[in-house]
């Protein structure tokens, strides 16, 4: 019978509530060789890396023996897969272009006595990027019931929409409204690099989290006044706009106020 010794979960605001996709965690060559010597095997599935043993004996004794064999060195897990995409949807510190380093010796433990251990990111100087170091003595002290967790925050950026009207139907009083009732700033007439004239709407510098499964929806509307009354009639032009792509970035504004924004162009 196989018994789990270690569980490590990846959680990400971009993918929530679904598991992180297109990414895997695997031991490096040296760690893989050592784990096989101890008859330990692993599986990565649905955002969770699990280490198993088929040997008899307590988890504490098995991990203590592994710690002696490691002689103070950690097991090393390496991120693999589409790291460029994962980095693009992750709120990384300014400068890094890939995932940080994590270690079981830099964790937040729950104050309420729970079993979750949250690994905190470390700088490149503390270890190689896009890796996780798990020290066997830390794993033994925590016990197999502990869930080690890495939480990635989703990228937060100001959003910009450019609306290009090719329908030959003039817009009267266009506006963009989110499903929570907020209105985007605009419209402002602007010229795109390809020469198209567009109306710009934006979040007025407010950074919003990007998400694969968004809870916020944006719609494009127009208003016109009926010739038979003084009332304004609201017309929905696009009920659900595509959300900005985290890779479609522009430098917004000029000088010291320049900011990175996620931009989307809409054609009518």
Image: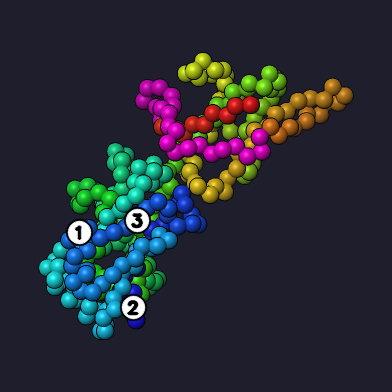
Q: Which residue is mark 1?
A: 29
In whole angstroms, how far apart are the C-alphas of marks 1 and 2?
Answer: 23 Å
Query: Considering the image in quadrants, where does the N terminus appear?
Result: bottom left
Q: Is residue 206 left or right of residue 173?
A: left
* Relative horizontal placement of residue 217, taking residue 263 as reference (left or right): right
Q: CA distance from mark 3 to mark 1?
A: 15 Å
247 above or below 6?
A: above
**Few, some or many C-alpha atoms within 10 Å of disc 1 (few <14, some 14-19, many ≥20)?**
few
Q: How is the image coloured?
A: rainbow
Identify the residue at image location x=22%, y=69%: 35
- Please give the label number shown on residue 99: none
Q: Which residue is mark 2?
A: 2
Q: What segment is highlighted magenta in the picture?
A: 238-259
Sooner in the amino-acid sequence: mark 2 or mark 3: 2
Q: Of residues 158 and 213, which is closer to you in this image?
A: 213
Q: Residues within 10 Å of mark 3 (few under 14, many from 20)?
A: many
Residue assigned mark 3: 24
Percent position of residue 152, x then y: 39, 52
Q: Secondary structure at mark 2?
A: loop
Q: Nearer the viewer, residue 206 or 245?
A: 245
Asked whether the viewer can see residue 111, the reply is no
The quadrant where residue 229 appears: top right
| Secondary structure found at label 1 | helix
* Label 2 – label 3 distance at C-alpha: 22 Å
């Amino acid at each position: 019978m196989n018994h789990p010794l270690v569980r490590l979960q990846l959680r990400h605001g971009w993918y929530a509530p679904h598991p992180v996709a297109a990414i895997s965690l695997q031991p490096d060559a040296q760690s893989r060789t050592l784990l096989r010597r101890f008859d330990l095997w692993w599986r990565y599935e649905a955002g969770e890396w699990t280490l198993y043993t088929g040997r008899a004996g307590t988890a504490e004794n098995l991990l203590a023996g592994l710690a002696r064999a490691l002689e103070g060195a950690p097991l090393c897990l390496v991120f693999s897969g589409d790291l460029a995409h994962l980095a693009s949807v992750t709120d990384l510190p300014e400068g890094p272009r890939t995932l940080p380093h994590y270690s079981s010796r830099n964790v937040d433990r729950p104050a309420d006595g729970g079993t979750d251990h949250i690994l905190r990111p470390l700088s490149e100087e503390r270890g190689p990027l896009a890796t996780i170091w798990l020290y066997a003595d830390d794993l033994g002290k925590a016990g197999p019931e502990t869930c080690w967790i890495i939480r990635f925050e989703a990228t937060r950026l100001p959003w910009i929409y450019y609306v290009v009207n090719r329908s030959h139907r003039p817009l009267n009083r266009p506006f963009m409204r989110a499903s929570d009732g907020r209105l985007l700033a605009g419209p402002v007439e602007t010229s795109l690099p390809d020469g198209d004239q567009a109306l710009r709407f934006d979040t007025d510098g407010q950074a919003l989290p990007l998400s694969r499964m968004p809870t916020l929806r944006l719609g494009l509307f127009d208003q016109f006044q009926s010739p038979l009354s003084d009332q304004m009639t609201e017309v929905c032009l696009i009920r659900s706009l595509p959300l900005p792509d985290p890779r479609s970035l522009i430098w917004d504004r000029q000088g010291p106020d320049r900011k990175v924004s996620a931009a989307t162009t809409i054609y009518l």
